[in-house]
Image (tube, rainbow, N blue to C red):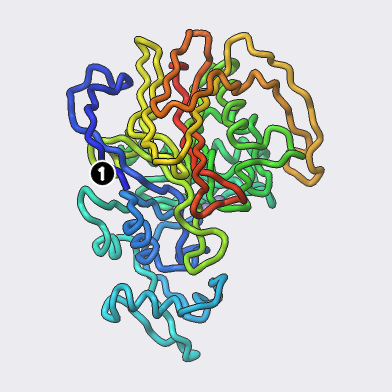
Amino acid sequence: MIRRIPLLVASIALIAGSVPAESHWFKGNTHTHSLWSDGNDFPEMIADWYLRHGYDFLAMSDHNLLARGDKWMTEEAIEKRKIVLGRKVLDKYRARFGAEWVETRTDPSGKLEVRLKPLEEYRRLLEKPGRFLLVEAEEISAGIGKVPIHINAVNVVEPITPIKDLTSIREVMRQNLQLVAAQAASAGKPMLAHINHPNFKWALTAEDLAHVIEDRYFEVFNGHPETFTLGDPARATSNTEKMWDVASTIRIAELKAPPLYGIASDDSHHYHGGRVTPGRGWVMVRAEKLDADTLVSAMQGGDFYCSSGVVLNEVRYDPSTRKLKLRIKAQRGVKYVTEFRGTLRGYDRAVKEVPADPKDASPVRLQYSDDVGKVLARTEATEPEFTLTGDELFVRAVVTSTNPHPNPAWEGQVEQAWTQPVGWE
Ligand SMILES: [Zn+2]
Ligand SMILES: [Zn+2]
């Protein structure tokens, strides 16, 4: 667990000219579910898992609510959420935090109920200044009919009621993103909204991600196996990395808008065995201090990368020399292949319409040429670097290791890291 490697902010070309201050890499997950919505453990237990596994921050992001107010659940309902039989959830909770912490009562029919603690109560138990932080968040779970359109709103101060069933997918995306932006403006606080799992129920296309320019972030990796990060060969442009490159290319070349930044998250629901478990994907944010506003501001500046296991000690892009440099924290016996991917000006813009599943929200999808998100260089160096010629719309790096993922979301998954697009500014 290597974190908080001191760096000089002055060395980050993106913030050239700022006063030198110490920066650190903070590891965090921005997408997590608890008993407050459809997860299967108490939020304290989940936060404790992340704390013990070396995370610096966690955003609990339950569906359409913030963990506030009074909420009780029967033990029976809690036990029903378990995927794998085993020790009782309430027993584990008591064993970890003590019988005094756990509040129970009996409902009129004689059933045992447990109180779900609001964030403001349980954060005192787990937060440690400079070491572990809980960030308030909500998964705005909107959609049109059966098409899910989910957006994580991070660092919010009020719950957001989703706007659903408008005339188009893009309008639902846009209006919900505008709710987060409006709240950020009125609260005077930085907030971040990321579009989640575009392939969950095959809801979103690369063009949706491109054209809703209010959006700046999307999940290039989501640990939930039903969100199909790798896409489906029968659905054109459904691999999330290809979607990312297509969306960024359309934005820069056609819409004169910034590219998307990628997010990796767990979207964990199961904490007692099961398939949707924590620890699969996260973000590493470079910031001066472990504070929600500071972290979100750093992410808004693009100063973060995504990981499913590969650790980068340095990611640096210097616009004056046009060099993108990475330093991989290499493990003995593990090989790392870094690909610098991007789209060049004058790329082949031809698209082909390809039928997908007729039941999909987009029964016909567009296939793009290999020029979009092309591999511009590939290296096995542990300090890979790429010098942009100025002909690129953007360049990003993806590092793929030979290390098998310890908790894979799909068979054969290996550890990776993804850096944000540069060179478009
Ligand atoms: Zn979701
Ligand atoms: Zn979720």
> Which quadrant of the view contains residue 249?
top right
Q: Is residue 237 left or right of residue 31?
A: right
Image point (39%, 37%), residue name: 330
* One can see residue 4 in this view: yes
Give the residue at x 66% y 47%: 144
206 horizontally vs 258: left or right: right
Question: Which image quadrant: the C terminus?
Answer: top left
> Please, which residue is most extreme toward the bottom here?
110
The answer to whether residue 177 shows anywhere in this view is no
**Whole-percent x, y for residue 56 in the image:** 31, 49
The residue type indicated by label 1 comes to Leu
In the image: residue 283, left or right of residue 25:
right
Ligand 2 within 8 A of label 1's CB? Answer: no
Residue 205, placed above or below residue 255: below
Q: Count the labels in the image.
A: 1
| Helix, strand or loop status at disc 1 | loop
* Horizontal arrangement in the rendering, residue 416 relative to residue 294 (left or right): right
**144 and 117: which is toward the camera:** 117
Residue at 70% x, 24% y is: 368
The residue positioned farthest toward the front in the image shown? 333
> Which residue position is annotated with label 1?
290
x and y, in percent, of residue 328 in the image = 38, 33
Q: Nearer the viewer, residue 331 or 394?
A: 331
Tell me if residue 410 comes above or below residue 325 in the rendering: below
Residue 182 picture location, percent across and down? 42, 38
For label 1, the crowd category at 10 Å Cα-Cα, with few meaning under 14, some 14 to 19 and many 20 or more, is many
Residue pictured at 63% horizontal, 21% vertical: 372
Q: Nearer the viewer, residue 98 or 377?
A: 377
- When asked about the image quadrant of residue 81, the answer is bottom right
